[in-house]
Amino acid sequence: MRSALDFSSWQTLISTLLGLVLVSVVAVGVRLLVMQTVQQRRERENRQINERLKTLIAAYKTLGGSFTGALAVDPRHLRELRALAPDAAGGSDRARRVRDAVEAALSDVILLGTDDQVRLAAHAATEMAAGRPVETAALVASLRDFIRDVLELEPIPASVAIPKQGPLRSLGARDKAAGGGGGPGGGGKGGADGGGGAGGGMGGGLGGASAAHHAGTDDDEPEAH
């Protein structure tokens, strides 16, 4: 059997070398194409994981941002809150804001969560739709364990007692109004001071012009005579 490499003449040697170079180039090109395809797939998977993790972390902060106070979500809507006493308007507005934030977080968990998280989020959404208060502690614990596992963090020891967590509380309309009440007064005072300064400057300018006019008249009178 003749060998695949023929070095009997220069022509056959050159053709053999060119064939080897061509085969090597094709092999390298195929390898680069495969590596690029695999790298793009990994980058796409990493982006998906990062977006999913970012969304679930935001949902965890919304659903488990409180350790004290009322940890249940009030599912009442605005038409029901309007029937409350005026004294409870601030608290009602806060409850409505918390409910809206929790509903958005539950929607994200149903979209991107695990099977267990989707089941817990769907149950909470069903309870809220029925008008019953909902606690999110179980869903928060599931999100916490999943996020720590994806980030390759050590599990929380069983000896560590973590209190029940509830939804993040946001400022109501009354709290925001109380916090920003000093702004308009300060602006009014500043405007008054600015107006006084402008008035003083205008008065001074007019006074100076009048004095200059009288001085010019006195200087011109002797020449008139």
Image (tube, helix red, strand yellow):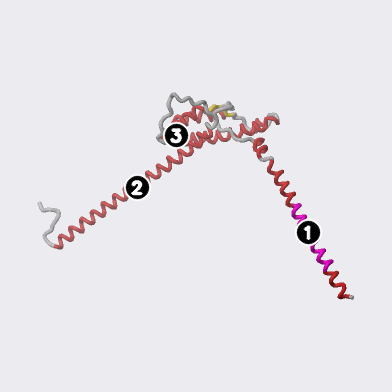
Alpha-carbon neighbours of circle 1 within 10 Å: few (<14), some, or many (≥20)?
A: few
Q: Classify 3 as above or below 221.
A: above
Residue 147 is marked as 3
- Label at residue 93: none
Task: Residue 77: give x, y in percent of width and height.
Answer: 62, 32
Image quadrant of residue 23?
A: bottom left
Disc nearer the start of the sequence (2/3): 2
Amino acid at the residue labelled 2: Thr
Q: Which residue is mark 1?
A: 204
Residue 201 is a magenta residue: yes
Q: Residue at x 26, y 53 (%)?
A: 26
Q: Which residues are magenta?
A: 195-215
Q: Decide which of 136, 12 is in the foreground and name it.
A: 136
- Residue of label 2: 37
C-alpha span from label 3 to label 1 = 70 Å
Q: Is the residue 221 above or below the residue 40 in the image? A: below
Question: Which residue is pictured at 13% across the width and 58% down the height?
Answer: 7
State the predominant SS element of the stretch in magenta: helix
At x 51% / y 27%, what residue is drawn? Answer: 137
Earlier sequence position, callout 1 versus callout 2: 2
Foreground mark, 1 or 2, reads 1
Would you say 8 lies left or right of 84 here? left
Question: Residue flagged by tag 3: what amino acid is it?
Answer: Ile
Tell me which numbered mark, 3 or 1, is placed earlier along the sequence. Answer: 3
Element type at mark 3: helix
Q: Amino acid at mark 1?
A: Gly
| Viewer-closest of 188 and 136 | 188
Q: Position of residue 95 (x, y in %)?
A: 61, 31
